[in-house]
Image (tube, helix red, strand yellow):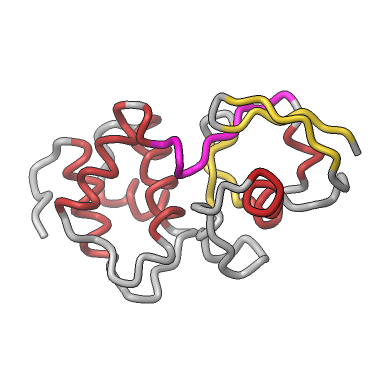
Amino acid sequence: MALSLTVNGKSYQLDVPPEMPLLWVLRDVIGLTGTKFGCGIAACGACTVHVDGQPVRSCSTPTSAMANKKITTIEAIGADKVGKAVQAAWIDSGVPQCGYCQAGQIMSAAALLKHNPKPTDADIDDAMSGNICRCGTYVRIRAAIKRAAGQKGATT
């Protein structure tokens, strides 16, 4: 199926099956490997990207549903000030251990802060609930989100 996608501000003309998950188009067709495969059933959040500014699990999203939408991946999240702040806070807070889930975590955190620049702990819990960190860095993730938001209590 011929399809036009806009990913990280660049237009791509692709011939892929309509049911092909967006994750595999990003990784295998376009070559953007920062978005990770975790579970394949949209339960872990490792594959999170932004579609029109909203966090979406790319492993279960058919590519055919992406026409006329703006897709942002981890490779481009630092191009805006919120994404850049989240990435810097992630480093400053020492969030990653193995790092596998971190692209999805950062994408969810950036989406949260774009829509709610001063989230409460409950807001953070709600926004991040679909992202699993097998290393258990949740306390550092919360601290990094608060640090990116410029909130007090953003220590590690």
> Which residue is nearer to you in this view: 13 or 92?
13
Q: Is residue 69 on the magenta stretch?
A: yes
Quarter of the image containing the C terminus? bottom left
> In screen coordinates, is 18 left or right of 65?
right
Q: How many marks?
A: 0
Q: Residue furthest right?
A: 1
* Whether residue 60 is situated above or below residue 3 in the rendered picture: below
Quarter of the image containing the N terminus? top right
> In screen coordinates, is 51 left or right of 136?
right
> In screen coordinates, is 18 left or right of 27?
right
Q: Position of residue 73 (x, y in %)?
A: 51, 41
Q: Is residue 89 on the magenta stretch?
A: no
* Whether residue 118 is situated above or below residue 142 in the rendered picture: above
* Whether residue 49 is situated above or below residue 35 in the rendered picture: above
Question: What are the residue bounds of the magenta stretch?
Answer: 68-77
Main structural element of the magenta stretch: helix, strand or loop?
A: loop
Q: Position of residue 120 (x, y in %)?
A: 25, 44
Q: Position of residue 128 (x, y in %)?
A: 40, 54
Q: Residue at the location (53% across, 50% down)?
A: 48
> In screen coordinates, is 133 left or right of 64?
left
> Which residue is nearer to you in this view: 7 or 138?
7
Quarter residue 99 falls in: bottom left
Q: Residue at the location (24% across, 51% down)?
A: 90
> Which residue is nearer to you in this view: 21 or 114?
21
Q: Position of residue 118 (x, y in %)?
A: 24, 34
Quarter residue 3 falls in: top right
Q: Residue at the location (77% across, 37% down)?
A: 65
Q: Residue at the location (21% across, 40% down)?
A: 148
